[in-house]
């Protein structure tokens, strides 16, 4: 394990999350997207574990008891055609519990070839992913949302276009998804951990929102990309995130 890189309130480790996580203290939330296990190019990390290995990895990284709550974004299915199961089932086995909440991330029209042979063997092409929330949802300091933001975000379907350009990382999450997850499920004074940091999207969201963040990524190339993106997020405030409004005195008459 290399020494961590510190950028603002973000502490970034390059290495195996299963080795690094036990060296960290308690945190507020894990917010992550684990490997999809469908042969994506994660460099040195690989993406072709057995389902039992992946379950063990997700259990150790996301449900070790170090975080008060876990917010986990996964696809619909996992595995090959012969060994295909719902990703939700694998996550629940890793968690040894059921999620408290679920959001459908509606990615818009489905791309890619249909699975199955027309017209005898239809297979559904996923145009959504899911976000599951496990654990204790109470945040003593609140999540800092206005009433309007709260009511907009607490709906079960989020329509957010996926990243079209995946040349930076093959599974790069839209920053808006990470921002929404951090907005709803991280305490304003808490620390968010992403054990599968990839290109650093959860860290970018935390940097923009003033949350403390710990990120871990196994592949050195993606780790460097994450460091650069998080540095950039601190340099460039998000034009779409409204600054807090100034307090003002209402007229009494
Ligand atoms: C689905 S991707 C995460 C993508 C990320 N949310 C983003 O927006 O870029 C999963 C990442 O986990 C990394 N990974 C796989 N096994 C790991 C391990 N044991 N420790 C740390 N990172 C790991 C892979 O290299 C990959 O970048």
Image (spheres, rainbow, N blue to C red):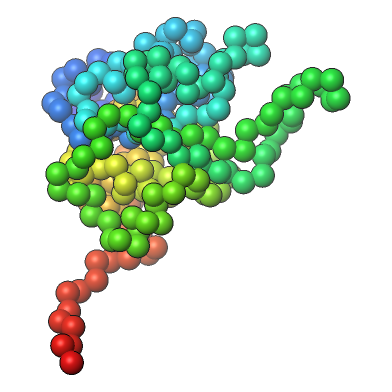
Furthest toward the front, the residue is 253
Q: Is residue 15 visible?
A: no
Q: Position of residue 219 (x, y in %)?
A: 39, 24
The answer to whether residue 104 is left or right of residue 32 is right
Q: Quadrant of the C terminus?
A: bottom left
- Residue 252 picture quarter: bottom left
Between 233 and 153, the one lying in front of the other is 153
Locate the N terminus and report the quarter of the image it occupies.
top left
Q: Nearer the viewer, residue 168 or 134?
A: 134
- Relative to 117, is 83 on the left or the right? left
Camera-nearest residue between 71 and 19: 71
- Looking at the picture, how far across and down is residue 70, in whole percent? 31, 30
Residue at the outermost bottom position: 253
Give the camera-side residue of 106 and 24. 106
Q: Is residue 4 visible?
A: yes
| Rendering coords of residue 72 (x, y %) | 39, 31
- Residue at figure coordinates x 66%, y 44% from the top left: 109
Counting every numbered tag in the picture gives 0
Q: Residue at x 20, y 74 (%)?
A: 246
Q: Residue at x 18, y 88 (%)?
A: 251
Question: Residue sitting at 84 percent across and 20 percent down?
Answer: 120
Q: Residue 182 placed where, x, y %?
A: 31, 44
Q: Is residue 92 above or below residue 30?
A: above
């Amino acid at each position: 394990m290399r020494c961590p890189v510190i950028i603002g309130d973000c502490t970034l480790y390059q290495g195996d999350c299963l080795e690094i996580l036990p060296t960290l203290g308690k945190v507020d939330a894990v917010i992550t997207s684990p490997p999809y296990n469908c042969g994506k190019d994660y460099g040195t990390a690989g993406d072709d574990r057995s389902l039992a290995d992946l379950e063990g990895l997700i259990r150790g990284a996301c449900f070790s008891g170090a975080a008060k709550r876990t917010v986990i974004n996964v696809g619909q299915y996992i595995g090959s055609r012969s060994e295909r199961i719902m990703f939700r089932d694998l996550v629940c086995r890793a968690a040894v519990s059921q999620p408290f909440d679920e959001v459908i991330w509606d990615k818009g029209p489905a791309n890619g070839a249909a699975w199955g042979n027309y017209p005898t063997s239809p297979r559904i092409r996923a145009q959504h992913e899911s976000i599951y929330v496990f654990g204790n949802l109470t945040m003593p300091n609140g999540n800092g949302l206005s009433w309007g933001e709260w009511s907009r975000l607490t709906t079960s379907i989020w329509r957010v276009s996926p990243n079209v350009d995946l040349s930076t990382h093959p599974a790069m999450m839209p920053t808006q998804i990470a921002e929404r997850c951090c907005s709803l499920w991280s305490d304003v004074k808490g620390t968010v951990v992403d054990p599968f940091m990839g290109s650093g999207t959860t860290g970018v969201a935390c940097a923009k929102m003033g949350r403390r963040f710990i990120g871990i990524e196994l592949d050195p190339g993606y780790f460097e990309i994450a460091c650069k993106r998080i540095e950039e997020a601190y340099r460039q405030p998000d034009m779409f995130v409204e600054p807090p409004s100034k307090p003002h005195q209402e007229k009494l008459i």
